[in-house]
Image (cartoon, rainbow, N blue to C red):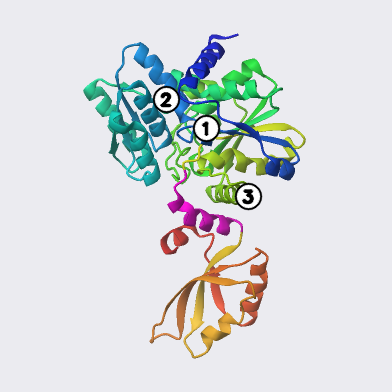
Amino acid sequence: MSTFVEAARAAEREMRELFPPTPLLRNDHLSQRYGAEIWLKREDLSPVRSYKIRGAMNAMRKARAAGAERFVCASAGNHAQGMAYACAHFGVSGTIYMPVTTPKQKIDKTRAFGGEHVEVRLTGDYVDDTLRAAEAHCKEVGAHFLSPFDDADVIEGQASVAVEMLETLDEPPEVVVLPVGGGGLSAGVRRILSEVSPHTETILVEPAGGASLAAALEVGEPVTLPRVDTFVDGAAVARIGKRTWEVLREVDPRDVLRVSEDRICTTILEMLNVEGIVLEPAGALAVDALKDVAERIEGRRVVCVTSGGNFDFERLPEVKERAQRFSGLKKYLILRLPQRPGALRDFLQTLGPDDDIARFEYLKKSARNFGSVLIGIEAQRAEDFRGLFERMDAAGFLYRDITGDQSLTDFLV
């Protein structure tokens, strides 16, 4: 057995000082839906509600053995919480840089986990800005920089997910579905599986607005994405890690999926409403990807890693909004309404019995014959809009569906 596998197993044993193995649970709802045996590796149930505690703890353990007593990191939340928890456990000081845009829930939890051992500094709008500030501070004070993913000891710690998974199951899974951000988790798990269970297939999943691995595979080396959608903040990374790339460069591009941020929202709501499982956007990536591989996994044993559950419920209205729009249950229209008595009543009569007006903004301009209305409509079924539009056309109303116009909806909605 290789040194890496033995080291990952040793790291897993050391973690029992901090927390028990996270559950690996068969999910009946997903199993029935996909005609497969679906298991969830519940990293959302770790002490910091993500797998990031593993890499942080393992890297800090090794750095302390080499004499380090002061640590610095940059993180949008989950790695920060893992480092804070480890700092409190080992009794060392840590400075944690987080973007100003980080959800308040993650900032508060980081401070709570670290207590007097950590200082949180909010810097920059994006993780790249935060990273530069953290690295500069690290050099200034001579601290040990704890990378969120691009570190051999962090990768080794994240690999303990696979160690636990294989020890729990009576037989290895046929497929493992993993989220990808910087690549620490996927690199660690793939290294374990390649040696211990080489017949297990891995499917890697990225958010469409942060597909840095797919971009690297296209050109054969890591590249920096020109822009990143930060909605899936736990996996929205502009550039795959250098060390993680050395492991992931051999991945078949067909095994790397890109899923839309809006569709992820439908999975977050489904898991919350049906299963009572709280997942953050990055934590829902692996489950959401099952929709794209339904035929491939039918009749097979599949493990999805639910990588995090640090969901700020203040974001729930946005998640619901994006899920409704993706599912075709909510649309936004710009309606040209004649400025005459009864025009609004005529429009309302075109609505079906289950159609609901969720937003209505009307600006009456006396010098014009028509006024513009921004209207949001919710339906019970996506096909209901076909009938609504037919009735509006028959009544002579002029309108524009702006639901798919991202620029307009970002500004107006």
Provide the residue designation for mark 2: 56
Q: Distance between the residues labelled 2 and 1?
A: 22 Å
Magenta highlight range: 311-327
- The answer to whether residue 75 is left or right of residue 409 is left
In the rendered structure, which disc, 2 or 3, sits on the residue that comes first in sequence?
2
**Crowding near pointer 3: few (<14 within 10 Å), some, many (20+)?**
few
**Residue lying at 37% horizontally and 24% vertically, measured from the top left:** 89
Q: Which residue is drawn at 53% across and 33% down?
A: 43
- Whole-Å distance between the Cαs marked 1 and 3? 32 Å
Q: Residues within 10 Å of mark 2 (few under 14, many from 20)?
A: many
Picture layout, residue 3 above or below residue 89: above
Check disc 3 and report the residue beneath it.
Answer: 274
The image position of residue 157, as x and y in percent, is: 48, 21
Does any portion of residue 151 appear in the rendered image?
Answer: no
Residue pushed farthest left? 140
At label 1, counting other C-alpha atoms closer than 10 Å, the crowd grade (few under 14, some 14-19, many 20 or more) is many
Helix, strand, or loop for circle 1? helix
Quarter in which the N terminus is drawn:
top right
Tag 1 and tag 3, C-beta contact below 8 Å: no
Mark 2 or 1: the one toward you: 2
Q: Position of residue 332 (x, y in %)?
A: 52, 66
- Asked whether 339 falls inside the magenta stretch, the response is no
Type of amino acid under label 2: Ala
By secondary structure, the bulk of the magenta-drawn segment is best described as helix
* Residue where numbered disc 1 is placed: 213
The answer to whether marks 2 and 1 mark residues whose Cβ atoms lie closer than 8 Å is: no
Q: Earlier in the sequence, mark 1 or mark 3?
A: 1
The residue positioned 64% from the left and 75% from the top of the image is 352
Of callouts 2 and 1, which one flags the residue occurring earlier in the amino acid sequence?
Answer: 2
